[in-house]
Each structure stands twice: as C-alpha cells, then as structure tokens.
Image (cartoon, rainbow, N blue to C red):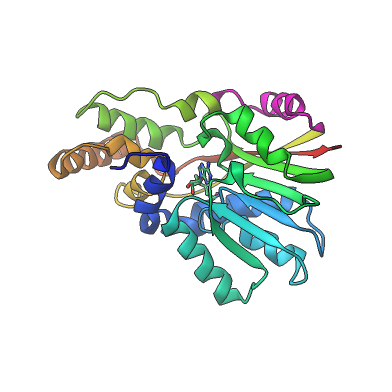
Amino acid sequence: MTTGENIVGDVFSAGAREFHSWSRVLWDPVGEVTAEAAGLTGGESVLDACCGAGASALPAARAVGAASRVDAVDLADGLLAIGERRAREEGLAHLRFHRHEVTSWPAPGPGYDVVQCGLGVFFFPDMDRDSAALTRMLRPGGRFVVTVWEKGALGGWQAALRGAVLTQRDLPRPPQMDQLARIDTAGALAAWLTDLGGSQPRVGRRRFEAPLSPETGWAPATGSGTRRMLDGLSPAAVERVRAEFTARLTADSVTDLDVRALTGTTRFPG
Ligand SMILES: C[S@@+](CC[C@H](N)C(=O)[O-])C[C@H]1O[C@@H](n2cnc3c(N)ncnc32)[C@H](O)[C@@H]1O
C-alpha cells in the first residue's frame, strides 16, 4: 500500500472514511473516556497525540474552553481533515489539528498541562522511547494519559479477520501487537507508567457494546491499523478475505466488537 516513514499515517489516511464510519460507536466513546480520565479543567493546555479524527481531542477542547490551547497531532491527513471539520462545526477554534510525527512535535516552551494519547502508543516504533518523548512535552507536574486496548478486546472480530487473511497470505505478528501485549492489563499499564517516571498511576477499565454484523464488521478492518494485513493482495484476493471473514463472523456468532479499554493517568513531577 505505501512505503516510507509515514506508513502508519498513510494506512489510517487511506481508510479514513471507513474509520470515521465507526466514530460514533467506537472511537468517540473511547475518546470520551480518555478525556474524562485526564480530569481537565478550564484553561488547561492539552496535547492530543495520535488524535485521529478527534475522538479525544474534541471532548478535551470542550472541557478546557476557548481560552486555552489544544493541539491535536497525527500523521494521517484523511483523519485530520475529518477532525478539522468536526471542530469547525462545533466552533472549537482553539482546537488545532497538525500533521506531524508526534514524538518530535515542537511543544510550547512551558510544556502542556496534559498530554493524552488514545490508542496510539503501541503504534510507535519504540513504545518506551517514544512515549518518554511525549512525557517531556509536559510542564512539571503535568498529567500523562494513555488509553490502550485491554487484553481480549476485539477478540472474536480479530480472530475472524486474521483467520480470513491467513487463507490468502502469511501474516507475521505485527510489532504493535507485541508492544500492546506489554501493557494490556491494569497492573502492567500501571507498572509501565511508573517505569516511564510517572507517579502514583491510576488505571480505569471500561467496556462498551459496539454491535456489529457481518456487513458492518468489514469497515473497521479496512479503517484501522489492520488495513495493513491486506497490503499487496489483489482486489480479487481482498474480496476472498472479505467473504471468508464474513462467513467466520457468522459461524462464530460474533455480534459485538467487545470493546475493552484501559486508561492510565499519571503525573510527571518534572
Ligand atoms: C487507532 S488510531 C486512534 C486515533 C484516535 N486517538 C482515536 O482514538 O480515535 C491511531 C492513530 O495513531 C496515529 N499515529 C501512530 N503513530 C503516530 C506518530 N508517530 N505520530 C503521529 N500519529 C501517529 C495514526 O495515524 C492513527 O491515526
């Protein structure tokens, strides 16, 4: 599909329409939880890292108010355009979307009150090093908030998709799955935040219903990081994957995405 340093951004950009078709049911509810965990108050400055279409940046901008600054940063042009439109429709002029590699984002001198990252850290090339870079964008005493999938999340849907793709090609385990596996329980996420230098991390767990049918289940497959599984397949092979995936969802009675999110919040003394 794409090559070069911006692979993850290009993958999400190419699937932007399909991604956004799940905003209301999936991304926005998880984003609300991220912003809620940040405990934002009026006037605070926020960096929303890996902002996508604004799922957590929009509620953060509502919470801090017009006199503050919210920078939403991502590499996926297609998602940034959707986020910009949504902010404009709500009149949130203080929420600005930027296309940038977030780990090298030029943070303002004093640092942000809050850096939040929803469903993003496990996509970084080096999750520890790159997340540490985000924490250095905080002011002393600032809060770092990370939302990740909990172990078992999206299980039936993901098994159907991987099984279907494997009928057409080999599928090496993607590095983000290994990174996520290090922080996908409450204890592991808290320990990881402590190792990063955070103090007294708190972790919250949330589960959502996100009903899917064999027809609607395909959109998140092509509108998220899993889109990469289809890289290099011919259109006919993609159609075969889709048919097999649909059949597996039906056979396995997968009727819900089984959304489980963990949100970790910690303070960085600086
Ligand atoms: C699963 S999406 C989550 C988007 C959004 N936070 C949400 O919850 O709806 C992950 C996002 O991380 C972005 N991303 C991954 N690595 C990035 C990086 N190094 N710099 C900026 N954005 C990145 C991708 O482009 C994608 O939009």
Assign the N terminus to one quadrant of the image: top left
Q: Would you place residue 241 above or below residue 35 in this image?
A: above
Q: Would you place residue 231 above or below residue 77 in this image?
A: above
Res 184 visible: no
Q: Position of residue 258 (x, y in %)?
A: 50, 40
Q: How many marks?
A: 0
Name the side, left or right, on which 130 lies relative to 229: right
Q: Would you place residue 36 above or below residue 123 in this image?
A: below
State the residue in front, 31 or 178: 178
Residue at image point 44% right, 50% down: 211
Picture quarter containing residue 232?
top left
Name the side, left or right, on which 253 lies relative to 58: left
Assign the C terminus to one quadrant of the image: top right
Q: Position of residue 162 (x, y in %)?
A: 33, 30
Residue at image point 72% right, 44% down: 137
Res 73 visible: yes
State the residue in front, 260 or 203: 203
Q: Position of residue 110 (x, y in %)?
A: 81, 51
Name the side, left or right, on which 210 lies relative to 129: left
Please give the range of residues in magenta.
181-199
Q: Does residue 183 belong to the magenta stretch?
A: yes
Residue at image point 55% right, 76% down: 89
Q: Does residue 211 belong to the magenta stretch?
A: no
Residue at image point 53% right, 67% down: 84
Q: Position of residue 216 (x, y in %)?
A: 34, 52
Q: Main secondary structure of the magenta part?
A: helix
State the residue in front, 90 or 115: 115
